[in-house]
Each structure stands twice: as C-alpha cells, then as structure tokens.
Image (spheres, rainbow, N blue to C red):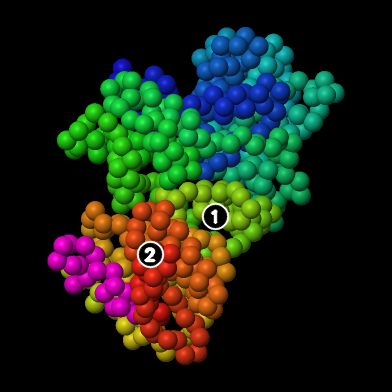
C-alpha cells in the first residue's frame, strides 16, 4: 500500500509515514505496566489518539493485559445529565470496546443488571475484574467535552476511590489512561456550575505525565528516511530534519503538514523531482502560513476568546518583554494547554510557525483597524529598477507616516504599539512578493529582528527602543553579527525614540564592515 503523510485522525504505520515513536511509547507503556492512572494532556493534533491506539495494539498482544478503548467524543448531552446516564454510557462503551478482545466476557457483562448508582457500579467493576482474570487497562479518549459535567467527575471519583483501596484488596482496573487537552487534575475548575465544584480533585491520584511528546530531529529524520526509500527521493536527512524542527519545535501536526506540503504540492511542480532541499522546506512554511486549517483556527480562537491571554502573548512576541515562566500562573497554564507557550525559564511561543501566524493575525487586525494604511498599498513605488525592495524609501515613508499620524498621540501607547504599526505598514508593501519572519531578541532594548525576503532578495531590519548611546553601540555590534550570520553586508535599523523631543533623523552607519541605514521615529 502506498503511504502518505497524515495530518488528520490517528496514524498507523501501514498507511502513513510516521516519526520514530519508540521513545514516547516506551515511557507511556512503562507507566501502564506500573499500574499508573494518568492523563495524556496535550494540545490538539499532538498524537494523543495515535498513542492510545499504539498502546491498544501492544497490550492486546500481551496475555497479561486486557485493554479496553473507548472515546467520549460525540456521545451527546443526555448521558451526562445524570449519574444513571453516565453509568449506562460508560458500560455501553466498555462492552463495545471489550467485544473485539473478549466476546464472551463482553456478552456476560451486557447481561448483568445495570447499576443504579456509582456504588453499585464500583461493585460491578470488581466483579468484572475478577471474571477477566487479567489486568484490565482502560484507554479513554476525548474526555474534554465530558469533563464539564458533574456525573463524569463522579465517575472519575469512583475510579479514584477504588484506586486508593486496591492496596487493601479492592479489585479494580490495573491502569487508566485518559487523553485530552486539559489536565484532568484541574477538571474541578471547568464545571458548568463552579459553585458545585468538589474541594478535592476527583483525579488527584493521577501520576505526573512528563513524557516529552514533541519529536526530536533524529525522530523526524526516521520518517524522512521511510519516505526517501519508498519514493526514491534524495535529501540530507539531518539537515532537513533540523530545519523542520527549527520551525515546528517538534509539534507533530506541523512537522507532518510541512512534509505533506512538500511531497504533494511543492515537489510535483519542481523541474527536479528527485530531491528535497532546504528551499522546499522554506517554501512549505510559506504555504502553511497562508492557509486556513483547524489547528490554526483553534490557535486564533483561543486568543480571541481570552483578552488577558491575547495581551500576554502580545507582550511576549510583539513587545519582546521578558516574562518568567510560572507554571502556577493560570494564564500561563492556559497558554500551555492551547499549545501557545512552550516550557523554559521565560515565556516563549511554542514554535516559530505559531509565532509567525500570531504575528500575521495581530498585524492584519491592526491594518483592519486603521484606514490610513490603505494609502500605503502601492507596493511598486518602493521597488528599484532591478525589482528589489528599496528599504531606505520604505523606512523614510514610515518615518513620515509616524510623524503625520502618531506624533500627537500618547507616547506610552505608541511605545506599546509601534512594532505592530510598522509590521502592519510593511505588510501591504510586500504582500504577494515577500515574506517577513520575526526573531525576538531579549535585551534592554527589546530588539526585534525581522528577516525579510522579497522575491529572491533578503534583508535584515532591526527594531529597537532608544536606550542611550551605550546601548545603541551594543545594538550595532549585535546587528553586525546578525548580518554576518546571514552573509549580508547591508542592514537596516528602525529606532523608536520616546524622548520628549525625538530626532526624526536618518543616518548611514559603517560598523564592523557592515553598512547600516538607521531611521529614528
């Protein structure tokens, strides 16, 4: 069977090119074997369902275990409205999941009297475990929608009580693995009626889930080798994998999506279809950033629906503010749940593609809110006879634009907004012909480096706040080093001067063998 890169639903090795999952799988399987109850809580399209199916397949082949898979997705509202409804829903899903593995036991359970409350269900679970004479492992997918209902939390509470009593001889499930976006330990905060929240979490017996679910470059290269062997396409596996990781930080959906773009949309249009290069990866990134998909829809929706989270992300990626990572902050934790923030010593957006997509979203919002940008849409007035972008003219025009539109406005507001104002100003000029990537640099100047490509030309623009001559000289040294990294001899510097009497000047600076055109606004 011909394989492909998969971006929807679960993956399986017979149909899809897959990254090396052995490290992730081994860590999770060990938790199951030890009898842990835990939650695989990660953002959407992170491979949670694929992992549950992999566990199901492996455990079915082990005579010690009796795995039962069930999903709460699409189970409807009615079963969640009462304890009886939840009990019947659970048993229906359990019987269905067991049928493939043990038809006789499944049939026997279906003929048992239905419990009237969770106490009766607890007794029934003990009876089922005794009849099975194996270690039953529950694999429960898509628990998020159910987790806002008290009946579901009481079901978890029953599992919790039996878990705590198993050292006293209570018969219960060997291991329970839940999968969803949220950490079930905090489900009490998601109740539809928060006043009814339990003091103790119904799932506080869950083991910490510390398995890194992102894929590393060598695990990505494993998938590339599969594809190369099957399709006869050559590539530098390590270099391509590193570049994919650079853009995605190993987010499973994003890695597979970039590869799918290259294999199905970009390579077929190339004259040389026999190899992948870094150029194809960059083209795939641009293609991805222009499209709408459910992953990006969910990302943007999470910002639109929470003004505080939007403002926090804005401070991190637009203002370049250094905010310590605090795992106890509800807002930080919410950003992690939605896949926006990664983990580190300070808050950072999880991956460069998300950062770029959020930048684009915020920039377009700015354009839509300012009619004055419409006057700047004549892109060809900023190009040279050779077709390159005349960035000196662009920066002069922006300086004039700021002087006309913003010189009389609140300086504190403009200091917060000016980077986004420039990005919004730049967008219609390069639209369709170029792309801009942002690299936030942490420093007292809150630097923001923009790598701008226009046709086949590349430019570096550094945005920073004026913080005095000493900081300015340090910034010039950093910009010269950044230009050297990109093999460029010329760069551009845009400085926001928030002094009472801004200079509104421009200057050509020679520094460490580089020519830098600087403009103050």
Quadrant of the rendered image containing residue 460: bottom left
Extreme-front residue of the structure: 513
Residue at x 68% of width, y 21% of height: 33
Residue 196 vs residue 511, the one in the foreground: 511
Residue at x 38% of width, y 83% of height: 505
Q: Quick check: can you spot residue 151?
A: no
Which residue position is annotated with label 1?
348
Residue 186 vs residue 234, the one in the foreground: 234
Does the magenta segment cover residue 206? no
What is the tally of numbered marks visible in this picture? 2
Q: Secondary structure at mark 2?
A: strand
Res. 514 mark: 2
**Label 1 CA crowd tier, 10 Å (few <14, some 14–19, many 20+):** many
Left or right position of 273 against 57: left
Inter-mark Cα distance, 2 to 1: 31 Å
**Quadrant including the N terminus:** top left
Q: Secondary structure at mark 1?
A: loop
Position above or below: 290 against 309: above
Position above or below: 386 against 72: below
**Label 2 CA crowd tier, 10 Å (few <14, some 14–19, many 20+):** some
Q: Which label lies toward us, 2 or 1? A: 2
Which residue range is magenta in the image?
A: 381-399
Q: Position of residue 3 (x, y in %)?
A: 33, 23
The disc, 2 or 1, on the residue closer to the chain's N-terminal end is 1
Residue at x 61% of width, y 50% of height: 344
Quadrant of the rendered image containing residue 67: top right
Extreme-left residue of the structure: 385
Extreme-right residue of the structure: 168
Q: Are marks 2 and 1 in contact (CB under 8 Å)?
A: no
Q: Quick check: can you spot residue 20?
A: yes
**Quadrant including the C terminus:** bottom left
Position above or below: 40 against 196: above
């Amino acid at each position: 069977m011909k394989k492909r890169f998969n971006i929807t639903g679960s993956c399986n090795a017979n149909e899809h090119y897959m990254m090396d999952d052995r490290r992730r799988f081994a860590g999770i399987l060990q938790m199951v074997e030890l009898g842990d109850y835990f939650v695989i809580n990660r953002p959407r399209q992170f491979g949670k369902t694929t992992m549950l199916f992999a566990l199901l397949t492996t455990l079915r082949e082990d005579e010690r275990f009796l795995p039962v898979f069930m999903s709460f997705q699409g189970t409807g509202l009615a079963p969640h409205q009462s304890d009886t409804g939840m009990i019947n829903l659970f048993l229906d899903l359990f019987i269905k999941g067991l049928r493939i593995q043990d038809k006789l036991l499944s049939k026997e359970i279906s003929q048992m009297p239905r419990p009237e409350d969770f106490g009766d269900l607890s007794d029934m679970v003990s009876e089922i475990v005794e009849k099975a004479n194996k270690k039953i492992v529950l694999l429960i997918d898509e628990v998020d929608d159910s987790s806002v209902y008290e009946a579901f939390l009481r079901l978890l509470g029953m599992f919790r009580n039996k878990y705590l009593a198993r050292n006293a001889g209570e018969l219960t499930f060997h291991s329970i693995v839940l999968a969803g976006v949220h950490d079930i330990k905090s489900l009490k905060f998601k109740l539809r009626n928060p006043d009814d929240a339990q003091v103790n979490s119904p799932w506080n017996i869950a083991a910490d889930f510390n398995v890194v679910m992102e894929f590393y470059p060598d695990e990505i290269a494993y998938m590339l080798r599969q594809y190369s062997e099957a399709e006869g396409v050559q590539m530098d596996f390590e270099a391509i994998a590193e570049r994919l990781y650079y853009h995605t930080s190993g987010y499973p959906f994003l890695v597979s999506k970039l590869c799918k773009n290259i294999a199905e949309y970009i390579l077929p249009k190339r004259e040389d279809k026999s190899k992948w290069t870094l150029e194809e990866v960059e083209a795939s990134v641009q293609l991805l950033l222009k499209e709408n998909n459910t992953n990006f829809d969910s990302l943007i929706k999470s910002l639109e629906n929470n003004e505080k989270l939007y403002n926090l992300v804005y401070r991190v990626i637009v203002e370049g503010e250094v905010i310590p990572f605090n795992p106890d902050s509800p807002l930080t934790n919410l950003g992690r749940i939605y896949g926006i923030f990664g983990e580190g010593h300070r808050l950072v957006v999880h991956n460069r593609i998300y950062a770029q997509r959020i930048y684009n979203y915020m920039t377009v919002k700015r354009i839509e809110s300012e009619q004055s940008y419409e006057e700047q849409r004549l892109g060809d007035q900023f190009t040279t006879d050779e077709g390159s972008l005349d960035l000196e003219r662009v920066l002069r025009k922006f300086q004039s634009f700021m002087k006309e539109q913003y010189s009389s406005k609140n300086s504190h507001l403009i200091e917060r907004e000016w980077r986004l104002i420039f990005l919004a100003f730049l967008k219609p000029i390069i639209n369709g012909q170029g792309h801009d990537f942002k690299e936030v640099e942490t420093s007292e100047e809150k630097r923001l480096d923009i790598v701008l490509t226009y046709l086949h030309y590349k430019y570096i623009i550094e945005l920073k706040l004026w913080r005095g001559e000493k900081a300015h000289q340090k910034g010039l040294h950093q910009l010269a080093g950044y230009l050297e990294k990109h093999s460029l001899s010329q760069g551009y510097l845009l400085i926001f001067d928030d002094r009472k009497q801004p200079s509104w000047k421009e200057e050509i600076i020679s520094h460490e063998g580089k020519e830098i055109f600087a403009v103050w606004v």
